[in-house]
Image (cartoon, rainbow, N blue to C red):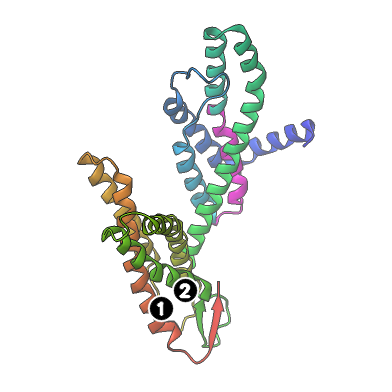
Amino acid sequence: MHPIRALHALRDGVSDNSLRVAILVGLATVPFTVALSWDPIADDIVAGGSVSGAPLLLAGLFVGYYYSDRETESRRAGIWTGLVASIAAVLVFGANTVATIVSEPSQWAVVAVIGTPFVLALGVGLIVLFSMFTAQFADWVTTRLRRAHRAPDASDDGGLTVPNPRWRTILAAYVLATPPVLGSVFLEIPASGAGFVLSVLGLLVLVPLSVVALGALFADATAPRSSKTDWAPNALAYVGAPIGTYALVYAVAALRGSGHPDGYAIYAFIGVLWITAVVYLFNRHRYFDAGGSAVRQLG
């Protein structure tokens, strides 16, 4: 973008009242990001540094939720939140550069001075993209929850509207894949050799599949349904059960001094998600797949 146009866009954004909340939220993240990222410079770092993403994650989620029912797009609001929040990156990267210039030999100081603008531009760009995608994700989730029990359109012909079958397929694949993988791990069937390799590969597939299955469960539970539908699943309960179990098990394992609290939490998450998926698929089959003379499918 031309510098003059960029300045005009910056001026218009700052003067736009609809973006005031997004800008204020971005400003609010700056002190927290700086505080969480203000570590002593490492011996092998000559430019840049690391910036904590926790405040920006929370900010993006809030902005996406706030702008989900407003005229201003959550994408635009997320971009502005990221732009303002990137002030923290400027401060952290600048402090690392100054520390390098003061403490390192002259050749490294020159590298730091030359490299900092490029590292800073990359960091700001990543922050803006992260904030934008986080806000859009929160907007999508909020919108799906808001329309979960509404008719898909104004005309209701009495047919039964069901979610897209691809979500059911993903959940069914997860339900079928989980027992053999977890069984081989807990029963210690593969003690060594090829069985151990297959068990590890199974976990490597099952863990990302569980994340995809959780998303499929949410998308299916929040798909629009006609007024003739007798079953309106509680998406927060179905999705919240495995997530809440993960957080609870992780906290308990960490408080008890477990060496790998994340491992226990992941196994608990997979197990509870499996139970949840089985219950959901049973109810889905009962109300949708096994009944209804006229069926419409929506994603």
Residue 222's disc number:
none
Say which residue appears at 79% left-offset and 31% top-offset: 4
| Helix, strand or loop status at disc 2 | helix
Identify the residue shown where x is 56% and y is 39%: 81
Quadrant position of the N terminus in the picture:
top right
Residue 168 at x, y percent in the picture: 47, 73
Q: Quadrant of residue 126?
A: top right
Q: Earlier in the sequence, mark 2 or mark 1?
A: 2
Q: How would you rate the neighbour count of disc 2 (Cα within 10 Å): few for under 14, some for 14-19, many for 20 or more?
A: many
Provide the residue span drawn in magenta. Answer: 69-88
Instruction: Specify the farthest residue to the front.
Output: 193
* Residue nearest the observer in this picture, 67 or 132: 132
Q: Is residue 96 left or right of residue 206?
A: right
**Does residue 72 belong to the magenta stretch?**
yes
Q: Position of residue 134 (x, y in %)?
A: 53, 47
The residue labelled by disc 1 is 284
Magenta stretch holds residue 230: no
Q: Amino acid at mark 1?
A: Arg
Cα–Cα gap, marks 2 and 1: 9 Å
Q: Main secondary structure of the magenta part?
A: helix
Residue under pointer 2: 168
Q: Position of residue 240 (x, y in %)?
A: 35, 59
Q: Are the residues flagged by discs 2 and 1 in contact, CB closer than 8 Å?
A: yes
Q: Residues within 10 Å of mark 1 (few under 14, many from 20)?
A: some
Residue 217 shown left or right of residue 258 in the figure: right
Residue 279 picture quarter: bottom left
Quadrant showing the C terminus: bottom right
In the image shown, does 143 or 93 lie closer to the viewer?
Answer: 93
Residue 241 shows in the view? no
